[in-house]
Amino acid sequence: MCFFLSILQKLGHRLSALSKTTWSEQTKDEIKQVLTVEYTSSDESSYEPDSDSEVPQLQNYKVKHLKWERTRLTNVKQTLDNIYLKSLPRRIRQSLVPRVPHSQESEREIPLNVIDWAVRQAAPARRPVPMPRQYLVSGSPAGSEASSSLSTTFEDRVLDPVLVSTPHCTRQC
């Protein structure tokens, strides 16, 4: 039960941070699609004995990375977490239990409602055939129509700026 409450708190913090961004409503709606329990990594409590007593104290939360999670989703989550943390008073920020990466990845399966920009495609069953150098340099063969026919996707339209900057947020006093 505590596990589920931890995930709900994390989701609540991210939704709160999302409302403080200056992202467009369309972008916010697309991000809200992945702010669900299925797309949220689990935290494992790590206890160690305190130096003054024998009673174990909570030292940190170990976060298991979702192995199917795309880097773009990870960046959005980190941005929202940073916005949330910056919105807290300094005293509360300093008293929070730190979150550190877990040494193991999560075993959680890919969600049923797959959002393409957030989920990695399944790994190929066999080793891919090496591509000729002309494909590796330009990303597509000369004269290819494939890349020009693609419409602007969520990740192209919105998330590239996330990689280079943190969006502005409005602080509610």
Image (cartoon, rainbow, N blue to C red):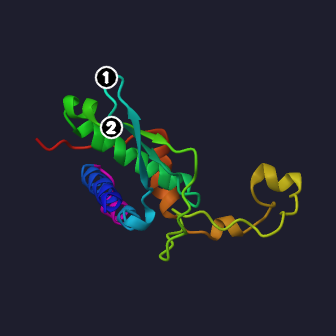
Which quarter of the rendering shows the C terminus? top left
What is the three-letter code of the residue carrying label 1? Answer: Asp
Residue type at the position of mark 2: Val
Quick check: is 104 in the magenta stretch?
A: no
Residue lying furthest front: 54
Point out the tag, 2 or 1, that comes first from the N-terminus. Answer: 1
The residue nearer to you, when weighing 96 against 135, is 96
User: What's the magenta region?
Assistant: 21-29
Q: Quadrant location of residue 131?
A: bottom right
The image position of residue 97, as x and y in percent, is: 33, 37
Instruction: Decide if residue 85 is on the left or right side of residue 130.
Output: left
For this orientation, the residue located farthest to the left is 173
User: Horizontal placement of 107 versus 27: left or right?
Assistant: right
Which x, y percent locates residue 32?
35, 64
Residue at 46% over, 48% down: 63
User: Which element type, helix, strand or loop, lies under badge 1?
Assistant: loop
Please provide percent x and percent y for residue 164.
48, 39
Q: Vertically, is 5 above or below 55?
A: below
Can residue 169 be seen in this snapshot? Answer: yes
In the displayed orientation, state which residue is furthest to the bottom.
Answer: 112
**What residue is shown with label 1?**
52
Please name whichever residue, 95 or 168, is drawn nearer the observer in this view of the structure: 95
Q: Position of residue 39 (x, y in %)?
A: 44, 63
Q: Residue at x 79, y 49 (%)?
A: 137
- Marks 2 and 1, how far apart at CA: 19 Å
Pick the residue in front: 20 or 11: 11
Q: Is residue 157 above or below residue 91?
A: below
For residue 97, the mark is 2
Which secondary structure lies at badge 2? loop
| Residue 141 in which image quadrant | bottom right
